[in-house]
Each structure stands twice: as C-alpha cells, then as structure tokens.
Image: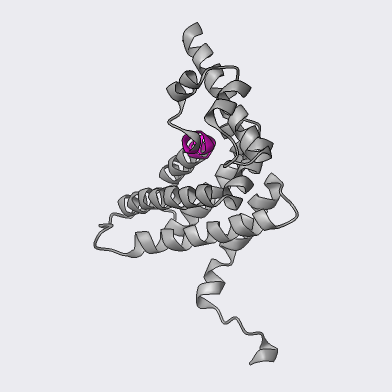
C-alpha cells in the first residue's frame, strides 16, 4: 500500500510537471526558468532538482511515459503478427489509451499542447529526435528478438523501424502544422499514413492519365 509520504512525493512531482508544461506552452521553453517552475508549484528550486535533472527532463517526462507504454505494447503483440502490423497496432493502441497513460500526471490537452511546443522549439525538437532514435533502437532489438534474427546481421528490424519512425515524423509535422489539434486528428493521421506505407514504397504513384 502506498504510504502518505509516497503520495505526498507523487503530488509534488505532478505539481512540478503541470507547472512546467503550462509555462513551457504559454511562455515558451527558452523563456521559462527552473525558479519560475518551482515558484508556480510552490516549492523550492532544491525540491525541483530532487525530482527532475533540469528543464529538458521535465519537458519530456510525460512523453517518456508514452514511450514506455509503446515499447510494452509492441512486446505484448501476438508472436505470429507481422512486424509492421505489430508496430501499427501498438502505436494506435497507444493513442487509444493515451488518457489512461498520461492523465494521472497531466491533462491530455496539456500533453498535446506540449507536443506542439516540442515541435516548434529547436532545442526540444533536437532532444525529441535524439530520444526517438534511442527508442527506435530499442524497438528494432525487440523486433529482432520476436522474429528470432540477429539485429546486427539482419538489417530488416532496423529497416522496418526506420520506415515506421519516418511515418511517425511525417505525421507529427503534419498534425502540428494543421488546423485540427485534437487527439482524434493525430490518431487518424497516424492510421492513414501507416496504411499508405505499402503503396508508397512499392506502388506506382502516377495516375492512369499521367502514364
């Protein structure tokens, strides 16, 4: 059973997390200081550093939760499922379960706003791409284990994850620059773009009139 001390620590972490994301999304990441986050959460700077290593750490805390959920979802997919289908189902399951995954920490609406802030902030976008590369390597090794191949000898796990990661990046950019910032919109874009991978890679793009 969770103790009173543990509940208090969890509440403090969540207060810091919400305060940071609210400030990042309204004032801007570069224009927000650790002192301002701590003040907004009504704690000291020293307390902030007990929970987070710095601004980047708190900026990606919720995204880290969703990344862990995605990796777990891929691991849980049926063994006989094709690798790309396993990735597709895992990521869509992640969007379907996003409220359950993040709302214990922050509202989904705030998480989605932070998603756009990351995309529009060069320092955060660079960190996001770095984190994505690490997650992709984890997934490639997981796929190799599922399929019984050597990830360093067989290029297919990394190729599959590279294609999948490219689709996710295209989806993120299109969603962040569009007019509909809803959860349903990014989920639908994700599904639509993944469905186009096969035809885009192996199909003829020209219409009958162009031939």
Using the rendered view, name the quadrant where residue 12 is placed.
top right
Magenta-colored stretch includes residue 60: yes
For the residue pair 107 and 76, the one nearer the viewer reads as 107
Residue 194 on image: x %, y %: 56, 61
Coordinates of residue 7 in the picture (x, y in percent): 52, 13
Residue 208 vertical position relative to residue 122 in the rendered view, above or below: below
Residue 134 visible to an observer of this rendering? yes
Counting from the top left corner in percent of width and height, residue 79 is at 39, 49
Q: Which residue is rendered at x = 25% and y = 59% of the image?
A: 152
- On the rendered structure, is 18 left or right of 64? right
Residue at image location 31% in from the left, 64% down from the top = 155
Residue 207 location, quadrant: bottom right
Residue 3 in sight from this viewpoint: no
Residue that sits furthest to the bottom in the current view: 211
Decide whether the magenta segment is chiefly helix, strand or loop.
helix
Q: Nearer the viewer, residue 141 or 137?
A: 137
110 w.r.t. 155: above or below = above
Residue range in magenta is: 56-65
Q: Residue drawn at (50%, 35%), measured in percent from left and top?
A: 55
| Image side of residue 175 versus residue 74, left or right | right
- Determine the residue positioned at 56% across, 28% down: 17
Tell me, yes or no, whether the highlighted magenta stretch contains residue 172: no
Which residue is the extreme one toward the right?
179
């Amino acid at each position: 059973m969770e103790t009173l001390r543990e509940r208090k620590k969890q509440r403090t972490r969540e207060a810091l997390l919400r305060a940071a994301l609210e400030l990042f999304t309204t004032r801007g990441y570069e224009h927000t200081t650790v002192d301002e986050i701590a003040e907004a959460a009504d704690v000291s700077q020293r307390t902030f550093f007990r929970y987070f290593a710095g601004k980047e750490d708190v900026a990606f805390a919720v995204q880290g939760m969703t990344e862990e959920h995605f990796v777990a979802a891929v691991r849980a997919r049926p063994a006989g499922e094709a690798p790309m289908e396993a990735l597709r189902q895992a990521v869509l399951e992640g969007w379907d379960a996003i409220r359950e995954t993040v709302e214990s920490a922050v509202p989904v609406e705030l998480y989605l706003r932070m998603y756009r802030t990351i995309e529009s902030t060069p320092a955060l976008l660079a960190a996001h791409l770095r984190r994505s590369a690490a997650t992709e390597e984890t997934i490639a090794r997981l796929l190799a284990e599922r399929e019984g191949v050597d990830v360093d000898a067989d290029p297919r796990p990394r190729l599959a994850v590279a294609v999948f990661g490219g689709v996710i990046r295209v989806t993120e950019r299109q969603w962040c620059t569009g007019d509909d910032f809803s959860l349903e919109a990014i989920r639908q874009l994700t599904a639509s773009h993944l469905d186009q991978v096969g035809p885009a890679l192996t199909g003829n793009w020209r219409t009958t009139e162009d031939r």
